[in-house]
Amino acid sequence: MNVLYLIICLGFLSSQTYNVSGIILDSETSQPIANANVYIENTDYGTTSDKQGYFSLYLKNEFQEDIILNIKMIGYKEEKRQLTLSDSTIDLGKIGLMLTSLELESVHIHSHEDDLNQISNIMLGGQELSNITLGTIASTLSNKSSVGVNSLGPVISKPVLRGLSGDRLLLTKDGSEIGDLSQSSLDHVIALDMTEVTQIEVIRGPKSLIYGSNPVGGVINTKISGNPKVRFDRMHNKIMFGRESHNKGMYVKYAFYMPIKDNQFNFIVNYRKTDDQNTSKGLIKNTYSKTLNLKTTFTKYNENGFFNIVYQNYNMDYGVPPIPGGGAVNGVDIELLKNSFQINYHQDISWNIFDQIDVRYDFIDYAHEEYANSSSSFELALAKKTHTLKSEIQSQNLIIGSELEYKKFLPQGLYWTPNVDEVKLSLYSFINKKFNFFDLLSSFRLGSLSMKLNKDRPIYNNNTGLSYMNLDSEEVRDRQFSYFSSSLGLSKKINKFEINAWVMNTMKAPQIEELYSDGPHLAVYSYEIGEPNLDLEKIYGFESSIRYTGEPLTTSITTFYNYSPYYYQMNQRGVCEEVNGELQLQDCLEDEIVQDGVGAAGWLYKYQTKGIKSEIKGLEFNLMYKIKQIQFSYDLSLVRGDDLTNSLPLSYINPTKQILNIDYMRQFANYKIRLSKIHSVDQGRVGEFETSTEGVLLTDIIFSFNYKMHSMTLQLNNIFDKEHYNHLSRIKDIYPEAGRNVHLVYKIMI
C-alpha cells in the first residue's frame, strides 16, 4: 500500500499545473481592457483578457522555475512580469497598462531579438519615428548624428553616413535590398515610401556584415508594414493621413489585417502627391512627385513558424529640376515602375545549438524612363531584374548564412552602356562569444561576383562601327571579382559604463556604371565615363565608443577612422569658362570637358571614374539629461574626409552638426523644441569643383498626441523661415532648401 500511495503521489506531482491570473486595467481611467494578449515569453502559451479585463492562464509542469509573462495590447505599452512558479496559484491582482503611441503592437511571434547593439547604432520606432518622419528616409534621418542628405531637389535625396554614400552604405527593407537603381546615380530615387516604414535601424559593427560586403558606413535597415512576424488575433484597419505645406504634399495610407484561423491576409495601399517645392526664392521648378504603392501578403502560421508570400507594385512619377545653362531647360521627368514578389519561410527548430532557420526568395522587376523637355518619347530607359535566394540558420549567438543573387541590367535609348548579367554568391557568418569579462564579436563575408556582357545589344559609333564614344572597346570585357570582408569587435560592461570597439576590412566590386558607362545621365546633367580596369575598392575601418548610463544623466562618445588605398569616385573633368555670362563651349570641347550633341541635353559636362587613396575620420558625442518630465538631449557630429592622392578634401562630406532637443512629456502628449546648428563649410574644406556653404541655425517645434486608437503629430519645421543651403545638394548654388513647413499626420486604428 505504501508503494502504491507513493506512485500515486509521484504521478500527481508530475502532472502539477499552475494557474496565473490577474485583471488588466487602463492605468489612467482604471477601466478594464478586453482582448489583451497574455503569454509566456518565447513560447506559444497564452490567452486573452475578457470584457472585465480578467485573464487566467493554466500552465503544465514543463517550465523552469522562473518565467517572464508578457502582456500586450494595441495602443498600450507592453508590460513584462518575472514570475517564480513556487505556488500552484499565482494571483497578480490589478495590472495597469500605460497608453503609448498608435503602432502595430500585436504579439510578435517568433521574435529572436538580441542585445548586441553597438553604442553608435540608431534605433527609431513608435512615436519617436513619427516625430521626425518626413518625405524621404534621408530627410527623416537628417537630424541624427553624422547623417547628411545628398540631394537633387526634395524628392531625390539619399542618406550620407559619415561621409559615405551610394553603395558604400547598405539600405535594406526587412533585411533585403530594395532592388532599385538609387545607388548607381544621384537622379535615381530610393523606391521606398516612408508611410510603409514602421522602424528604422542604423546598424554598425561586426553584425552589419550579414547584410552585405561593404557596410563600413553602416546599414540602414527599415522594417515595413505587413511583416509576417506581426500576427493579429482579430481584424484591424489602420488609416493614416498627412499634409505638408512647403510642397502642398498630401498622402494617405490604408492597411487591412485579417486573420482567419492559422492564416492572415494583409492589404496595404499608400498614395503620395507633392507639387513643386517652395523656398524663400520661390518655387523650384519640376520638383513634383506622385507615388502609388500597393501591397498584399498572405501568411500561413504553424506551431513554430510561418510561410509567407508578398506581392508589391510600386509606381512613381517625379521631376528633376532644370539647371540654368543645361540643355533640358524644362527639367527631366522620370517614370518609375517596380514589381516585387517575395517568399519567406521561418521555422523554430531544436537542432544542436541552433534554434531557427530562415529561407527567403525575392524577385524584383525594376524599370524607369527619362523624358527631357516634356517630350512624349523617352531619351533613355534603364531596367534591372533581380533574383535573390537567401538562407540562414542561427542560434542566440551564432548566424550562418548564404546568398545567391542574379541581376540583369537592361539599358535602352541614348545610353552607351552594355547589357550586363551579374551573378553573386556569398557565404557569411557572425558569432558572439561570451567570456567572463567581455564579449568577443566576429564576422566574415566571402563572395564572388561575375559580370558578363550580353552581346545582344551592340554599341555603335557612326564612324567606326562597333565601339564606344570615349572608351576603348578592347577594354570593355567580362569581369570576375572575389572578395573577403571581415570584422572583429569587443564589448564590455562595467557597472554603468559600456565600452565597444571594432575593426573591419571591407571589399566592394565596382558597379556596372563605374566600369562600362559611356553616356549621358540627363537628369543630373552629366556625361559619365567609366573605367573598365577598376579593381576592388578596399576600406579599413575602426570605431571605439564608451557610454555612461545613469540617472538622470546618460552620455556617450564615439570616434571612427576609415582608410582606403583604392577609393573610386566619379569626378568632373573641369568647368567651362564664362565670358560675359556665356560659356565658351568650343574651348571645353577641345579640352575634353564636355560632350556635345547628346539628344535633348545638347551638351553635358564629362565625369570620369578614377581611384584615389582616401581617409575619413570623425567624432560623435551625445548627452541626455532628464528632470522629471523634461528631457534634454544634445548631439555633436564631426566628419573630415581627405583625398590623400591629390592632397585635397574629399567632396560631399557631411558638415559639422549640433542638435539640441528639449522634450516635455505628458501621458497623452509630448512637446519638443529642436535647435539644429549646421556649421559652415569654408573654401578650405571643399573638394574639387565644390563651393563653400554658409551655416545656419534652424528651429523646429513638434507636438504629438496619443489617446487609445488615435495618434496625431504636428511638425513645424524652420519656424523662422530662414534661407539656408544644404552643402550636399547638387543644386545648392542655385536653389535654397525649403522654408517654413507645417507637417501634420493623423493615424487611427479601427
Image (cartoon, rainbow, N blue to C red):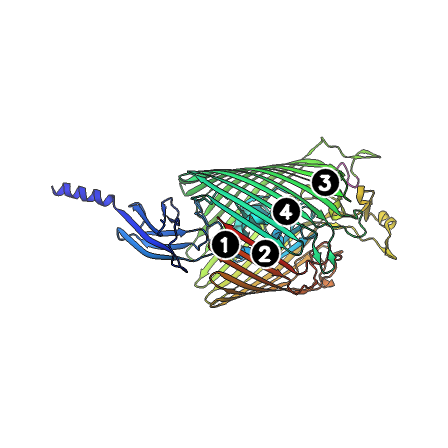
> Label 4 near label 2: C-beta < 8 Å?
no
> Label 4 near label 3: C-beta < 8 Å?
no
Looking at the rendered structure, the kind of residue marked 2 is: Leu
Local SS, label 4: loop
Q: Nearer the viewer, residue 443 or 339?
A: 339
Start and end of the magenta stretch?
Answer: 469-477
Q: Earlier in the sequence, mark 4 or mark 1?
A: 4
Q: Earlier in the sequence, mark 2 or mark 4?
A: 4
Q: Earlier in the sequence, mark 2 or mark 3?
A: 3
In this rendering, does residue 405 appear at all?
A: no
Q: Which of the 4 image quarters holds residue 353? A: top left
Relative horizontal placement of residue 286, taking residue 349 as reference (left or right): right
Local SS, label 2: strand
Q: What residue is shown with label 1?
A: 710
Q: Earlier in the sequence, mark 1 or mark 3?
A: 3
Local SS, label 1: strand
Looking at the rendered structure, the kind of residue marked 3 is: Tyr
Q: What residue is shown with label 2?
A: 744
Q: Residue at x 50, y 46 (%)?
A: 237
Q: Nearer the viewer, residue 399 or 710?
A: 710
Q: Mark 1 or mark 3: which is in front?
A: 1
